[in-house]
Amino acid sequence: MYAVFQIGGFQYTAEEGVTVQVPLMKIDDGAKFDIDEVMLISDGDNSQVGQPFVENAKIEAEVVGRGKADKVIVYKYKRRTKYRRTAGHRQDYSEIKINKIVAPQA
């Protein structure tokens, strides 16, 4: 069984037992929480698609850890003016583990 859900404006596909990197959440490590914004649930044969979310569906997850993504280099350049700027950025993320996908009874 897998599901498509939304956190922080981004959509993710997940199965039970999988860890996913999402934008940094203000939840402590080891804390459990529910994701209510489930857009699709499928078990292979049956699929439920929401408009935009599936009613009474949720995903039980827990925060495993935090980290920073790989560095992204931003380089600005304008010709003939000696203008060059280099900047780097590392995005913070939370790593969550999908414990259970709860589908509504059809």
Image: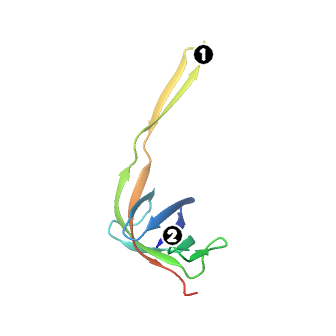
Mark positioned earlier in the residue sequence (1 or 2): 2
Q: Residue at x 67, y 73 (%)?
A: 51
> Which quadrant of the figure contains the C terminus?
bottom right
Residue extending furthest toward the right: 51
Up the image or down, 23 lies above or below 80; here it is below
Residue 17 drawn at (x, y percent): 36, 69
Q: Residue at x 50, y 63 (%)?
A: 13
Secondary element under disc 1, as helix, strand or loop, is loop
Judge the density around disc 2: few (<14), some (14-19), many (≥20) Cα neighbours within 10 Å: many
- The CA distance from mark 1 to mark 2 is 48 Å
Residue 18 drawn at (x, y percent): 38, 65
Image position of 100 (left or right of 58): left
Up the image or down, 93 lies above or below 51; here it is above
Image disc number at residue 79: 1
Image position of 56 (left or right of 86): right
- Which residue is labeled 2 in the image? 3
Quadrant for residue 62, please give it.
bottom left
